[in-house]
Image (cartoon, grey):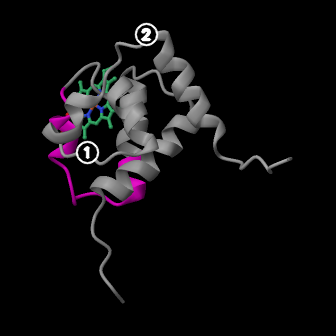
Amino acid sequence: MARARSRGHAWIATGLLISSLFGPAADVRTAESGDGLPEGNGKQILTTFCIICHESTEITKFRGYYDRRQWRDVVVTMKEYGAPLNAEQIEALADYLEQSLGKPKTPG
Ligand code: HEC
């Protein structure tokens, strides 16, 4: 049966492809309880690229401070610093960071 392929999932494949380049030892289990990062598609990207230069606590300590636009700015800045992210991964991370560490939305 022909299931419609959902757009926006290409980056997942990209992330998996890239992480597979790092080998099956790219184990993210340590991040599960220690860093308080919820499981999510963006976590794969984060635990692959964002911990190259610093620990994930450098990121999680800003939990609740930034909205999506600000998180995206952070990610873009990190790309400028040298994080090897493509455009899709930037958007995926912005979504993930908003959902997992984003500023609580105030009602009204
Ligand atoms: C190429 C190295 C590098 C990579 C890869 C990298 N960072 Fe950074 N990051 C830095 C440096 C250097 C600093 C400290 C300098 C500063 O505070 O501006 C930093 C600081 C931060 C901070 C603290 C900013 C602040 O205001 O103090 C956050 C949040 C952050 N990084 C998030 C990320 C995220 C999310 C990723 C993955 C997309 C990432 N980083 C990947 C180099 C990197």
Residue 23 has which mark?
Answer: 2
Q: Residue at x 49, y 39 (%)?
A: 90
Looking at the image, is 64 positioned above or below residue 74?
A: below
Magenta stretch encompasses residue 67 = yes
Dot 1 or dot 2: first in sequence order is: 2
Q: Residue at x 19, y 46 (%)?
A: 36
Distance of label 1 from label 2 (alpha carbons): 22 Å
Q: Is residue 62 left or right of residue 88?
A: left
Discs 1/2, front: 2
Q: Which residue is mark 1?
A: 37
- Estimate the x, y position of residue 38 in percent, counting from the top left: 29, 48
- Estimate the x, y position of residue 53 in percent, counting from the top left: 25, 20
Magenta stretch encompasses residue 51 = no
Quadrant hosting residue 32? top left
Looking at the image, is 73 positioned above or below residue 101?
A: above
Choose between 86 and 18: the one closer to the eye.
Answer: 18
Choose between 102 and 77: the one closer to the eye.
Answer: 102
SS class of the residue under badge 1? Answer: loop
SS class of the residue under badge 2? Answer: loop
Magenta part of the protein: which range? 55-72
The three-letter code of the residue at mark 2 reads: Gly
Q: Residue at x 36, y 31 (%)?
A: 78
Q: Residue at x 46, y 42 (%)?
A: 41
Q: Residues within 10 Å of mark 2 (few under 14, many from 20)?
A: few
Quadrant hosting residue 11? top right
Q: Is residue 95 left or right of residue 77?
A: right
